[in-house]
Image: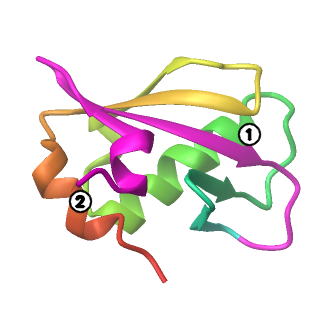
């Protein structure tokens, strides 16, 4: 049975690609499900790459993966992003993404 996580992540040869929606200049830093979408809120503004760097830190801390393994592969200047977590598996991230 497909769940929300199946819509937000897919396995590749390199690792897992997460499809996320970013809300810069939010009041907090957190990952949360909104319907079938994975949303990342960051306090940082969308200027000088600050929000993107914050997104990488939030994912790293939340999913317990090193920042060096996280790369934004699509949507550098967009709120909708695809983020590669190198070396990860969907089964490994599935538990971590079952958020509150």
* Mark found first going from the N terminus, 2 or 1: 1
Label 2 vs label 1, nearer the camera:
2
Question: Helix, strand, or loop for circle 2?
Answer: helix
| Rendered position, 29 above or below 41 | below
Q: Which residues are magenta?
A: 1-28
Residue behind mark 2:
94
Looking at the image, residue 54 sits to the left or right of residue 27; the answer is left
Q: How many marks?
A: 2
Where in the figure is residue 82, as x and y percent of width and height? Answer: 50, 27
Q: Which quadrant of the figure has residue 83?
A: top left
Q: What color scheme is it?
A: rainbow
Q: Residues within 10 Å of mark 1 (few under 14, many from 20)?
A: some
| Residue shown at the point (57%, 41%) measured from the top left | 20
**CA gap, disc 2 and disc 1:** 27 Å
Relative to 99, 21 lies left or right: right
Q: Residue at x 15, y 41 (%)?
A: 88
Asked if disc 2 and disc 1 are in contact, CB closer than 8 Å, the reply is no
Q: Which residue is mark 1?
A: 50
Q: Residue at x 27, y 49 (%)?
A: 66
The image quadrant that residue 34 belongs to is: bottom right
Instruction: Locate the N terminus and report the quarter of the image it occupies.
Output: bottom left
x and y percentages locating residue 49 in the rendered image = 72, 30
Q: Is residue 54 above or below residue 96?
A: above
- 34, above or below 75, in the image: below
Crowd band around label 2 with a 10 angstrom C-alpha radius: few (<14), some (14–19), many (20+)? some
Return the x and y of residue 63 as percentages of the image width and height: 32, 62
Residue 60, picture quadrant: bottom left
Q: Position of residue 89 (x, y in %)?
A: 12, 42
Q: Does the magenta run of residues contain 9? A: yes
Work out whether residue 34 or residue 60 is closer to the camera in this orientation and state it. Answer: 34
């Amino acid at each position: 049975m497909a769940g929300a996580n199946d819509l937000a992540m897919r396995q590749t040869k390199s690792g897992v690609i997460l499809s996320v929606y970013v809300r810069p200049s939010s009041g907090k830093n957190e990952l949360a499900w909104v319907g079938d979408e994975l949303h990342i809120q960051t306090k940082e503004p969308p200027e000088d790459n600050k929000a993107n760097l914050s997104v990488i830190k939030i994912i790293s801390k939340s999913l317990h993966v090193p920042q060096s393994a996280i790369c934004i592969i699509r949507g550098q200047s967009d709120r909708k992003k695809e983020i590669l977590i190198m070396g990860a598996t969907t089964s490994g991230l599935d538990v971590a993404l079952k958020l509150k």
